[in-house]
Image (cartoon, rainbow, N blue to C red):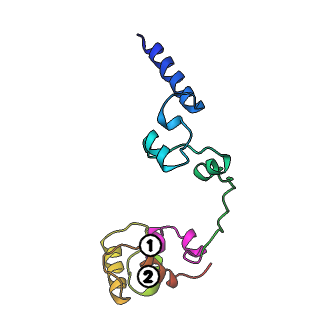
């Protein structure tokens, strides 16, 4: 017997079972008394016989609605945080110079003088002295730049 023939037999049997034409105890109507239940055996589950109980087990799918649009900003995020970008080395040097921590030239190169100035600024402002201008450090350091 070929695979196609086996598939055809299985599909035919499945359609007969679905239509209620197969001769199995589960396809027979539900017994009305306990005495006849013993005659049929007690199957674990019988398919529903009326439309109301069918809908109980197989409800209609819920309607799909379009997702709600999110506001541009929420209470947890502020517009300033969304637009924050990493400062350039020149911006860092200008701010450090105006704050009084950097004495070198504003050349846009993050050398040892710039890193030392960042660490001194962080220590003086109660920040973690790691020499990296992160969000918290830049928030304090950018206050020394003129507003645009």
Q: Quadrant of the N terminus?
A: top left
Q: Is residue 84 magenta?
A: yes
Q: Is residue 65 magenta?
A: no
Q: Residue 79 in the image: x percent, y percent?
A: 60, 74
Number of other residues with Cα within 10 Å of mark 2, as a class: few under 14, some 14 to 19, many 20 or more:
some
Residue at 48% from the left image edge and 67% from the top image edge: 86
Q: Residue 142 in the image: x percent, y percent?
A: 50, 80
Which one is earlier in the sequence, the residue at label 2 or at label 1? 2
Q: Which residues are magenta?
A: 75-93
Residue at 60% from the left image edge and 48% from the top image edge: 58
Residue at the extreme front: 35
142 with respect to 123 (left or right): right
Q: Residue 22 in the image: x percent, y percent?
A: 53, 28
Residue at the extreme top: 1
Relative to the observer, which residue lies in front, 85 or 121? 85
Number of other residues with Cα within 10 Å of mark 1, as a class: few under 14, some 14 to 19, many 20 or more:
some
Q: Quadrant of the C terminus?
A: bottom right
Relative to the observer, which residue lies in front, 66 or 7? 7
Q: Are marks 2 and 1 in contact (CB under 8 Å)?
A: yes
Cα–Cα span, label 2 and label 1: 9 Å
Q: Residue 33 in the image: x percent, y percent?
A: 52, 49
Badge 2 element: helix
Disc 2 target residue? 97
119 with respect to 48 (left or right): left
Disc 1 target residue? 106
């Amino acid at each position: 017997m070929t695979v196609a023939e086996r598939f055809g037999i299985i599909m035919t049997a499945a359609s007969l079972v679905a239509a209620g034409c197969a001769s199995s105890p589960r396809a027979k109507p539900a017994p009305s008394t306990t005495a006849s239940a013993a005659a049929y055996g007690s199957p674990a589950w019988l398919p529903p016989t009326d439309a109301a109980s069918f809908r109980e087990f197989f409800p209609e799918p819920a309607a799909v609605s379009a997702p709600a649009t999110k506001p541009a900003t929420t209470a947890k995020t502020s517009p300033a945080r969304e637009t924050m970008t990493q400062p350039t080395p020149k911006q860092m040097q200008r701010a450090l110079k105006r704050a009084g921590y950097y004495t070198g030239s504003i050349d846009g190169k993050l050398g040892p003088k710039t890193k030392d100035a960042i660490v001194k600024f962080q220590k003086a402002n109660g920040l973690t002295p790691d020499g990296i201008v992160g969000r918290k450090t830049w928030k304090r350091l950018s206050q020394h730049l003129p507003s645009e």
